Amino acid sequence: MLRFYGDPGRKGPPHHSPVEKDNLSVIIFLTVCTKNRKHRLASSEAHRVLIEWWTKADAWFVGRYVILPDHVHLFCAPCLDVPLGKWVGYWKNGVARMLKTGAEPLWQRDFWDTQVRRSDSYDGKWEYVRHNPVRHGLVQKADEWPYQGEIHLLDWHDS
């Protein structure tokens, strides 16, 4: 039986509520994958639709992001009291409807999230994420990848 974090009944990653502490920024690093890791996202159309739904789903701000063929990495921060899972579900449903994937689901059922704890962690994760297209052999340099950007500036505040 597959086990996550010692819980024998768990069938997906745990999603903890963001921890607000001492006026520190709340920034979440999020990864969302396509169903069966099918290559459906690295296109101008998918890029446009994702930005449209991230903007429309305004309970969380989307900062920097990279869209790869079979998954998306993004940094997000809450701006309303809406749980992360509800927000992710909202935009995943909207994107799937607009991209018309037919009977087969576009997205994996769950997602991976990690709260960023320090400014250097945020910067380090971004550098890693933006070089994903290079590691996957999609481009020679990270800046050449057309499906990346930043919608909102998510500043890190230490206090």
Image (tube, rainbow, N blue to C red):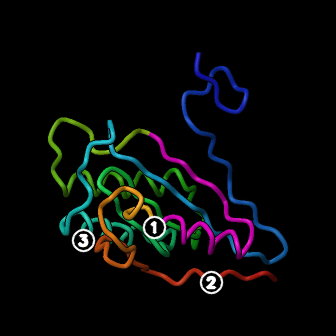
Q: Indicate the quadrant containing the N terminus: top left, top right, bottom left or bottom right.
A: top right
137 with respect to 12 (left or right): left
Helix, strand or loop at label 1? It is loop
Q: The residue under label 3 is which amino acid type?
A: Arg
User: Residue 126, image x and y in percent?
Assistant: 55, 70
For residue 103, above or below residue 74: above
Label 2 to label 3: alpha-carbon separation: 24 Å
Crowding around mark 2 (Cα neighbors within 10 Å: few <14, some 14 to 19, many 20+) is few
| Amino acid tagged 2 | Asp
Q: Of the residues under marks 2 and 3, which one precedes in the sequence?
A: 3
User: What residue is disc 1 on?
Assistant: 131
Q: Please, what secondary structure does the residue beneath circle 2 have? A: loop
Residue at 54% over, 71% down? 127
Would you call the spot at circle 1 few (<14 residues within 10 Å), some (14-19), or many (20 or more)? some
Of 128 and 153, nearer the camera is 128
- Which stretch did the figure color magenta? 110-129
Which sits earlier in the primary sequence, circle 1 or circle 3?
Answer: 3
Residue 144 percent coordinates (x, y): 31, 77
Separation of marks 1 and 3 at Cα, in angstroms = 21 Å
Q: Does the stretch in magenta take in 113? A: yes
**Horizontal side, residue 134 vs residue 16: left or right:** left
Identify residue for label 3: 48
Residue at 63% x, 21% y is: 9
Q: Which residue is mark 2?
A: 155
Q: Residue furthest front?
A: 140
Say if mark 1 contacts mark 3, CB within 8 Å.
no
Measured in 3D between alpha carbons, the distance from the residue under mark 2 to the one under mark 1, in whole angstroms, is: 21 Å
What's the residue at 52%, 57% (across, down)? 30
